[in-house]
Amino acid sequence: MVVREISPGIYAVGAIDWERRLFDALIPLPQGTSYNAYLVQGSEKTALIDTVDPSRELDLITNLVSLGVERIDYLVVNHAEQDHAGTVPMVLELYPGSKVLCSEKCRDLLVRLEGIGAERCEVVGDGAAIPLGGRTLRFLSTPYVHWPETILTYEETSRFLFSCDLFGCHLATSELYCDDFLTIAQYSKRYFAEIMMPFRKSIAKYLDRIGGLPLAGIAPSHGPIYRDPAPVLAAYREWSGDCLSNHVVIPYVSMHGSVRMMVMRLCDTLMGAGVKVHPFDLTVTDIGDLATTLVDAATLVIGTPTVLFGAHPQVIGAAHLANLLRPRARFATVIGSYGWGGNAVDQIKGVLTHLEVEFLDPVMAHGAPDAKVLQDIDRLGMAIRDRHASLGLM
Ligand code: FEO
């Protein structure tokens, strides 16, 4: 990525990863991503805010060299995950006089993950300020967005907030800025679903504080910079609040057609009742799409066949993912079929322990779904409709 100035004396010096297609060996990246890092030059001191994924360390170093950066006094590490902190060891080696500024938990993680000497780190607490000469970095403690060590960095003169993962999106683009949030809203929401959704209650609290800052822009560590922060802040308020939608998410696997028949019957019943549906055949599902629909949906219905004695392993995986992401859904249930081992429902319920949901009566077919099973599916659809109506969603 070329170096670009975003405010006098503040430069984007990170890297675009056009080619990456998987993150954390889990999350698909259909649009690639970027690892943003920012150089802040004061009249007396220079700070680098975050680094890049080790696979792109040459980009960062090249950018620093092209800017003629001979000294880095402070290396701010907002977050210790390797896509931002993985090049910290190289920066510290190239700039031996530099000191890491980070939270106490981040220091401990950097020691463990990156082998950095704790003596190279200076712990900064919530509200601490570091003057650079004409510029001042101020730190906000924001644990669990999305690791427990995370801080945000606010530069008081430019009024830019360097938010690391928060407000980011996995999007490789030559556009430095996003001036129309609607053009990237789908990527931002997907990112929120994959990374931030489990921490929405913490995020809701931080949004008030962030919204109270004079802001000229928000510069995250993935995706473009927001010169108008209002739309992304509003979106985050919506996604992290309590307002649900009249939607049902139905991840399922069907081995021989029985579960698929039940899922499609449920979809028809729900659509006929005015409820929106999102069926996901897990054998071909992009889990980022599944996660995104979980942000708003009021109900989760999991469809599973039985493999030997239990639910299909891919269904268990999806249920585990949903449990980790902790969506706001208020209702859940299981539909499916079995031959001789009928404990799939309890198995799936046992996975969804973090969801704060009312479990509706499951519908399990012993063999292929017969007329009674399909009537039970219809009753389930009406029960979901009634629950949604009771929440004022339709
Ligand atoms: Fe972009 Fe949590 O790392």
Image (cartoon, rainbow, N blue to C red):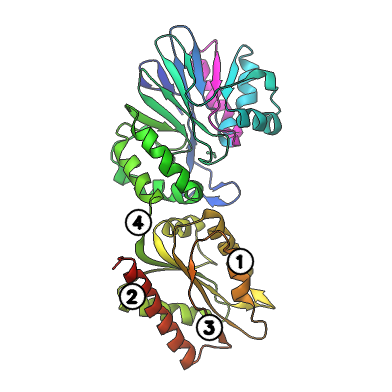
Q: Is residue 103 left or right of residue 160?
A: right
Which marked residue is nearer to the observer: mark 4 or mark 1? 4
The residue labelled by disc 1 is 316
The residue labelled by disc 2 is 271
Q: CA distance from mark 3 to mark 4?
A: 34 Å
* Earlier-in-chain disc, 3 versus 2: 3
Checking the image for residue 258, the label placed there is 3
What amino acid type should be assigned to the residue bearing mark 4? Cys
Q: Secondary structure at mark 3?
A: helix
Q: Is mark 2 within 8 Å of ligand 1?
A: no
* Earlier-in-chain disc, 1 versus 2: 2
The residue labelled by disc 4 is 243
Give the x, y percent position of residue 384. Answer: 39, 74
* Earlier-in-chain disc, 3 versus 4: 4
What amino acid type should be assigned to the residue bearing mark 1? Ile
* Earlier-in-chain disc, 4 versus 1: 4
